[in-house]
Amino acid sequence: MTNSPDIATTRLEAFSDGVFAIIITIMVLELKVPHHDTMEELLAQWPIFLSYALSYLMVAEYWMNHHLMFHMVKRVNNRILWSNLLLLFVLSLIPLFTAFMGENHFSAFSTAAYSGYMLVCALVFNAWFWALSHQLGADTHERQCLRRAGLIKSFVAIAVYALAIPMAFCSPLLSLAMNVCVATLYFLPNSWLEHKQKG
């Protein structure tokens, strides 16, 4: 069905929401219950908890962007279906890199690997975003603003992730801070979209 007509988004959204929920569930299962009821044992879990919190924020922001975009796109085609499946695939591997970084206490290599994989996610998200932006209809001022916001977010995120990879071998904590900056950046298009939805 390579030339199938546009179809409704209902099943795509339901499937995507299920995958997002499973990703978060897998990540939270990596949080280990301390074997002894001491503060030291509890605090020893901080690398795993911190890596979980960062990845939870990123997955939540991907979901928010996904949710808001599908409030604007009412029909999907094969390009959107395949780009959405690819996006879900790369996001589904975030728990692996999250656990790898947390279990290794933010070592240089594990932090670099995490930043590298976040770069992959950002690149795939960019492709997904452009697939959906072409489905918004006429090239209106709203569509131009959406593209501009998405373009700024994507390229800045990609650049920061690319810099965070080598930075991890100099300072893993600084590399981690750069990942947090990207997570903060992802709020910007959401704010714009929410304003447009209310307008």
Image (cartoon, grey):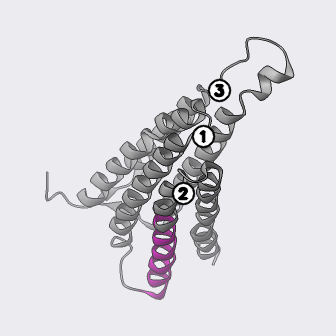
The quarter holding residue 48 reads: top right
Amino acid type of the residue that numbered disc 2 sits on in the rendered structure: Met
Determine if residue 23 is in view.
Answer: yes
Amino acid type of the residue that numbered disc 1 sits on in the rendered structure: Phe
**Residue farthest to the top, as pictured:** 35
Residue 86 % position (x, y) = 32, 49
Residue at screen point 57% across, 51% down: 58
Amino acid type of the residue that numbered disc 3 sits on in the rendered structure: Leu
Mark with earlier residue (1, 2): 1
Instruction: Report the quarter where the C terminus lies.
Output: bottom right
112 in relation to 38, above or below: below
**Front-lying residue, 93 or 187:** 93
Q: Is residue 142 within the magenta segment? A: yes
Q: Which stretch appears magenta?
A: 140-158
Disc ID at residue 106: 1
Residue at screen point 59% across, 76% down: 196
The quarter holding residue 193 reads: bottom right
Q: Give the labeled residue for mark 3.
A: 31
Mark with earlier residue (3, 2): 3
44 in relation to 180, above or below: above
Disc ID at residue 167: 2
Circle 2 Cα neighbour tier, 10 Å, few/some/many (<14 / 14–19 / ≥20): many
